[in-house]
Amino acid sequence: MSPPFPFFFRVILVFNKVSLQHFLFHFTMLDHILPLISRAANATAAEPEEDESRYGYTPTKYVCLILLVLFSISTLIHTGQAIRYRMLWPIPTVLLAGLLEIAGWGGRFWSSFDDTKDTPFMIQIVTTVLGPTPFLAAIFIIFGAIVRIMGQGYSRLTPRYYSLIFVSCDVISLVVQGAGGGIAASGDTLEDANMGGNIMLGGIVFQLVVMTLFLGLAGEFFYRFFTDSPIAGRAFARVETEDSHVTLTNSGYKLSSKMRVMLVALFSITAFLYIRAIYRTIELAGGWHGVIIETEIWFNIFDGAMVVLAFYTMNFAHPGRLLGRDAMDSKNTRTVGKSNQLEMGSTGSLLEATRDQPFSAPNHTYSGGQY
């Protein structure tokens, strides 16, 4: 039985039903949040002199231009991949994140010509803080598909709830940061502005905690998978087929080369974004004029470089190529029916070997027809 999560989680997002409605939802949220945080950035920072840099340094032109070009190319490639593999879920996740990063590094490039202007500074502070958040949603969606393929019996949550819960937490993080921005913008004193800034920091810390919880659940899943220790009460049919991503025989699972690449890529992407989240937490905790936030090289390495690595890793290890479009869409999945036949999707991938409550058939090997 699926965990009894509150109804509002079901309303926020339903696994693998990402559509243009969610795309509009994300932009509706951003439409309210971006102006608040933008005003907060202006309110939280102490008023500089007319000739004083808003950053504490002047952004390096060539660094900003390189990252701006890299994010633009990667986002363009992701757009082409979404079209090629006919996937909608990258639109409100990876593509939205790409647009935010392009805007952020565009703002920093603008500031490299005049670092005293407020507008480009506020653009980059808003978009670089929020940019990776939609990208995290893509990680949760992909991991849910991996769980469906490799075996739900090893997972603490069903694939649907990985997206439902963790993407919802992403939205909550945005709301918290927006609330902090509203307090900071409406405050009449520096203390009020700093309080709003701390609430914004709380939103990022919450995101870091969510990522840590996700890593814990993912770690348990892979431990159970590689030790063949399914959660009590969950057993599943043992299948073997040459074209499947996963071959499950009496001796255990064997991963295909494509699945191995996907797992390494997903781990790498998560590690890049986790490092970035730790850095942004430390950076904002030091205040708007702290040592870390006013040191450009740390931002370039632990924010810009980490996020761009995440983008290109997914370009090279795209789930549309490695998992198949059907594996990413629950509408197209097939389960083992009463006749004990394994139905395959159009990509020839193993889409699902179990239901949420899979049956047990441990001593049989699939050979292309009946068990």
Image: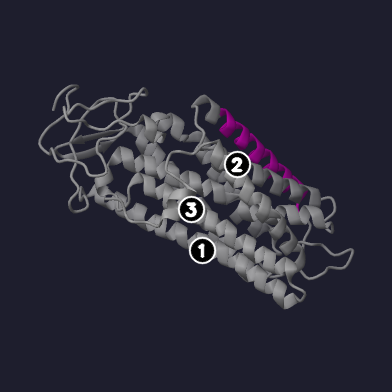
Q: Residues within 10 Å of mark 1 (few under 14, many from 20)?
A: some
Point out the tag, 2 or 3, that comes first from the N-terminus. Answer: 2
Q: Quadrant of residue 281?
A: bottom right
Residue picked out by circle 2:
24
Name the residue tied to disc 3: 168
**Residue 351 vertical position relative to residue 185 in the rendered view, above or below:** above
The picture quadrant where one finds residue 277 is: bottom right
**Magenta region, residue range:** 59-80
What is the secondary structure assignment of the residue under circle 2? helix
Q: Earlier in the sequence, mark 1 or mark 2?
A: 2
Seen at 21% across and 42% down, the residue is 358
Is 78 in the magenta?
A: yes
Q: Secondary structure at mark 1?
A: helix
State whether residue 191 is above or below residue 304: below
Main SS type for the magenta part? helix
Residue at screen point 12% across, 39% down: 362
Q: What's the mark number on residue 206?
A: 1
What is the spatial separation of the Cα atoms under label 2 and label 3, in whole angstroms? 15 Å
In this rendering, would 368 be left or right of 271? left
Of all residues, the one furthest to the front in this rendering is 7
Q: Is residue 201 left or right of residue 167?
A: right
Q: Secondary structure at mark 3?
A: helix
Q: CA distance from mark 1 to mark 2?
A: 24 Å
Q: Residue 190: give x, y in percent of width and height.
A: 75, 75
Magenta-colored stretch includes residue 114 = no
Q: CA distance from mark 3 to mark 1?
A: 12 Å
The amino acid type, in three-letter code, at marker 3 is Ser
For the point 59% across and 32% down, the residue is 79
